[in-house]
Image (tube, helix red, strand yellow):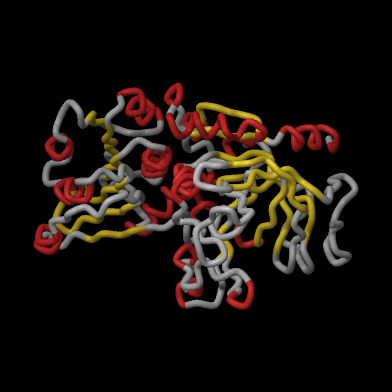
């Protein structure tokens, strides 16, 4: 359909009525099809998707379902388009939107909370009490692109203005897709205390969030920053992103190593590995009164030594996504070149080759870390606009 009369568009950024979109059928089954281009409503914009990074959570959703919740249930066979770590160019403005302009480059947070529940009013919109209630008579206004509404494995998507983060023109499309990953790490450190300058931090697990967790912690002034993991090449990348020490847990006991570097234990642990004994090891790494942030979720329920946590007054925080506007702070660090997030971008594919891109991400082909898919049609439109 054409855009409604109350939606502002520009001849410099023509909006088609149909777009290519990947749709999830049965688990693991993605099909490239056509969908109508959605129209932005009040407080929304239409984003032409220029690039999307593949996240481990995308793989969970595509193959297992949770944490996606479409029309109150699993996402399969509901005409659902996954993908959430995307950036692009604003091409249409919903009614009353004057905070952004057509032609602006943005990256997007996933979550737009309902705005009316207790958590949203506290700024904890990733913990919205009305998560998934965004359809039919139960529509509370919650939106989580790629989780509870259509995501970014397509050509266009609507986004609430609260989810937008302006991207500096000097930042590449690929780097801009990593702002949300850095924002998740920033959110974790925000919850642990925010001001971590001079404090000691361990990051466990050198995946995308863990690696950027190292970068953000160092940019915030943490000293020392220690990264633990199983692969030397990932640990070396951690050094480039700011780790003062790295520990290969295949070669030495991580708790002993951490306490060798910081006698008495560290102030904070950011747990990004989802390993079965990760919480207990983190509890042994922190000092008394220390804090642990859980940024990864294991598939099984692990046994946890609660008595040790209680006796030592250790605090545990679970974070969901990129809350409390952390992405804005992360983008500022990236804009200021406080760290080079592009180090974790290893592969690029065209959107038409999404299945192969997912294979690289899922099977870690060629040690893939962050795989980005790009919209070739967006590139041609950008060239025409310039």
User: In the image, what residue occupies the spot 48% across and 29% down?
Assistant: 343
Percent position of residue 136, x then y = 64, 73
Residue 311 or 24: which is nearer the viewer? 24
Quarter of the image with the N terminus is bottom right
Q: Quadrant of residue 382?
A: top right
Percent position of residue 327, x then y = 52, 52
For the question of whether residue 334 can be seen, the reply is no
Percent position of residue 206, x then y = 35, 35
Taking the image as shown, residue 378 lies to the left or right of residue 354, namely right
Quarter of the image with the C terminus is top right
| Total number of numbered discs in the rendering | 0
Percent position of residue 251, x then y = 17, 26
User: In the image, what residue occupies the spot 50% across and 27% down?
Assistant: 346
**Rendered view: 292 above or below 58:** below
For the question of whether residue 154 can be seen, the reply is yes
Taking the image as shown, residue 40 lies to the left or right of residue 228, namely right
């Amino acid at each position: 359909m054409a855009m409604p009369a109350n939606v502002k568009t520009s001849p410099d950024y023509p909006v088609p009525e149909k777009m290519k979109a990947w749709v999830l059928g049965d688990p693991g089954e993605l099909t490239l099809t056509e969908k109508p281009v959605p129209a932005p409503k009040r407080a929304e914009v239409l984003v032409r998707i220029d690039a999307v990074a593949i996240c481990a959570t995308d793989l969970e959703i595509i193959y297992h379902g949770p944490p996606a919740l479409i029309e109150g249930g699993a996402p399969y066979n509901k005409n659902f388009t996954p993908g959430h770590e995307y950036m692009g160019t604003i091409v249409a403005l919903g009614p009353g939107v004057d905070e952004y302009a057509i032609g602006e480059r943005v990256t997007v947070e996933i979550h737009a909370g309902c705005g009316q529940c207790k958590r949203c009013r506290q700024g904890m919109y990733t913990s919205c009490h009305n998560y998934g209630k965004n359809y039919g008579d139960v529509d509370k206004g919650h939106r989580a692109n790629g989780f509870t509404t259509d995501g970014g494995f397509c050509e266009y998507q609507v986004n609430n203005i609260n989810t937008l983060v302006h991207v500096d023109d000097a930042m590449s499309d690929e780097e801009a897709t990593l702002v949300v990953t850095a924002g998740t790490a920033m959110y974790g450190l925000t919850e642990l205390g925010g001001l971590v300058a001079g404090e000691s931090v361990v990051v466990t697990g050198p995946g995308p969030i863990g690696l950027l967790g190292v970068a953000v912690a160092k940019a915030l002034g943490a000293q020392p920053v220690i990264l633990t993991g199983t692969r030397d090449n990932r640990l070396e990348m951690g050094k480039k992103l700011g780790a003062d020490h790295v520990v290969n847990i295949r070669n030495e006991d991580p708790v002993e190593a951490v306490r060798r570097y910081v006698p008495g234990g560290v102030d904070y642990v950011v747990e990004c590995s989802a390993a079965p004994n990760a919480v207990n090891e983190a509890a042994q790494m922190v000092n008394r009164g220390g804090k642990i942030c859980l940024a990864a979720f294991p598939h099984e329920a692990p046994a946890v030594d609660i008595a040790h946590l209680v006796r030592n007054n250790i605090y545990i925080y679970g974070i969901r996504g990129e809350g409390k506007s952390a992405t804005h702070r992360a983008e500022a660090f990236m804009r200021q070149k406080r760290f080079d997030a592009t180090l974790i971008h290893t592969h690029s594919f065209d959107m038409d080759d999404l299945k192969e891109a997912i294979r690289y991400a899922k099977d870690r082909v060629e040690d893939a870390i962050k795989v980005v898919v790009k919209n070739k049609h967006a590139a041609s439109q950008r060239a025409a606009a310039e």
